[in-house]
Image (cartoon, rainbow, N blue to C red):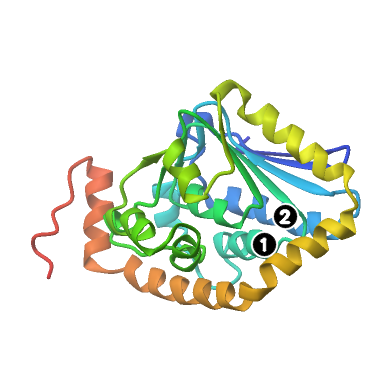
Amino acid sequence: MSMKVSTEQGLMSIAFDRPQKKNAITAAMYATIADALESAGDDASVRCILIHGDDEAFTAGNDVADFLQNPPQGADSPVVRFLRAISTCAKPVVAAVNGVAIGVGTTMLLHCDLVYCGESAKFSTPFTRLALCPEAASSLLLPALAGYQRAAEKLLLGESFGADDARDMGLVVRVLADAQTLAYARAQAAKLVALPASSLRTTKRLMKQGRADAVAAQMDAELGEFARMLVSPEAREVFSAFLAKRTPDFSQFE
């Protein structure tokens, strides 16, 4: 099993459960998460959503081999459904991050309402290193959150950064001991479950509505560029090098 989805006492838990691959996400996993988020919107018994991985990894991002076999193909592709669902979710979304959060593992957090991480958590947005561009409207949301210069350092260089940096940027609310992260996030989610659901939904909508159209438009623009760049010679070099376990060589490209 690659995902675990359960609902108990008003809280829907969505857990990455592929530890042997550091919870790398396949198309089937994206479909499962999208289905869960979409169903949560229509289920009055779900009052809050908690997303988490395990002690070693939140998620290592896309499973490269699966991604190459199942690239995004339009608005109905699983990854696009997931991005739409998490960016428009009306109910509170809490995330607990331990270990690595790579690529979409970091950018999806920009759409969560409360994010908690362990002290050993490592984040990265390595899109330029893959000859690709940002996704999940991160090219809009990260500069707005962290300021242009700090966002540029993360998005242009694609280097990993730690828990304290993520907190200072505003990407996470609180840094905890690794062993406490999930329990703390679950306790915070339980507080949300106990509050008036309509008040939470209205408050979230009011906070997000000012840039909802901009987020949707930026996501569309990124997806268009991402699809174009995915078939570029540079990207082919990256993925060929990855599968051959060698360092990519960009010196042949302008």
The Cα atoms of the two marked residues, 2 and 1, are separated by: 6 Å
Side (left or right) of 104 relative to 9: left
Identified at 39% across, 56% down, the residue is 68
Residue 59 seen by the camera: yes
Check the image and report above or below for 245 versus 182. Answer: below
- Could you say which is closer to the camera, residue 109 or residue 5? 109
Side (left or right) of 101 relative to 30: left
Circles 2 and 1, Cβ within 8 Å, touching? The answer is yes
Side (left or right) of 154 relative to 139: left
Residue 6 seen by the camera: no
Residue 32 lies, in percent from the top left, at: 66, 50
Question: What amino acid is labelled 2 in the image?
Answer: Leu
Quadrant where the C terminus sits is bottom left
Check the image and report above or below for 246 versus 196. Answer: above
SS class, disc 2: helix
Residue 172 lies, in percent from the top left, at: 55, 44
SS class, disc 1: helix
Residue 216 lies, in percent from the top left, at: 58, 74
Extreme residue in the left direction: 251
Check the image and report above or below for 89 versus 162. Answer: below
For residue 37, the mark is 2
Identify the residue position indicated by label 1 in the image: 85
Displayed quadrant of residue 177: top right
Quadrant where the N terminus sits is top right
- Could you say which is closer to the camera, residue 211 or residue 234? 211
The residue carrying pointer 1 sits among few (fewer than 14), some (14 to 19) or many (20 or more) residues within 10 Å by Cα, namely: many
- Could you say which is closer to the camera, residue 6 or residue 204? 204
Identified at 69% across, 73% down, the residue is 209
Question: What amino acid is labelled 1 in the image?
Answer: Ala
